[in-house]
Amino acid sequence: MTNREKEILHLLLQGKTNKQIARELGISDFTVRDYASSIFHQHGVNSRVELLAKKMKNPNI
């Protein structure tokens, strides 16, 4: 996982929207969406809710 993916993962887990993340990082909403899709794929989930549930079960992700 790249540093940018880790940064976006952290913001996703804080409950921020793609738009909020994009503004905070100075990138486009579409770029955030692409990163989020990659993060979901890497963790074997399909949504933020599944990602959060997985994080709650395993805090080390």
Image (cartoon, helix red, strand yellow):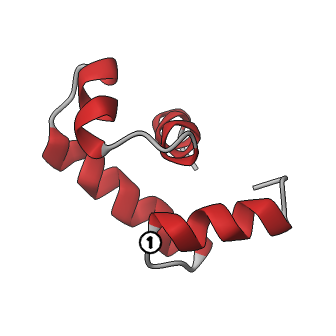
The image shows residue 33 at horizontal and vertical percentages of 26, 54
Label 1 Cα crowd, 10 Å radius (few <14 / some 14-19 / many 20+)? some
Secondary structure of the residue carrying tag 1 is loop
What residue lies at 36% left-to-right and 65% top-to-bottom?
A: 37
The image shows residue 48 at horizontal and vertical percentages of 48, 63
Is the residue 13 above or below the residue 49 in the image? above
Viewer-proximal residue, 32 or 12? 12
Q: Amino acid at mark 1?
A: Ser
Is the residue 45 above or below the residue 20 in the image? below
Q: Quadrant of residue 38?
A: bottom left
Is 25 left, or right, of 3 in this rendering? left
What residue lies at 44% left-to-right and 79% top-to-bottom?
A: 46
What residue lies at 83% left-to-right and 54% top-to-bottom?
A: 59
The image shows residue 7 at horizontal and vertical percentages of 52, 33
Could you tell me how many numbered marks the image carries? 1
Q: Which residue is mark 1?
A: 47
Is 13 left, or right, of 29 in this rendering? right
Is 60 left, or right, of 17 in this rendering? right
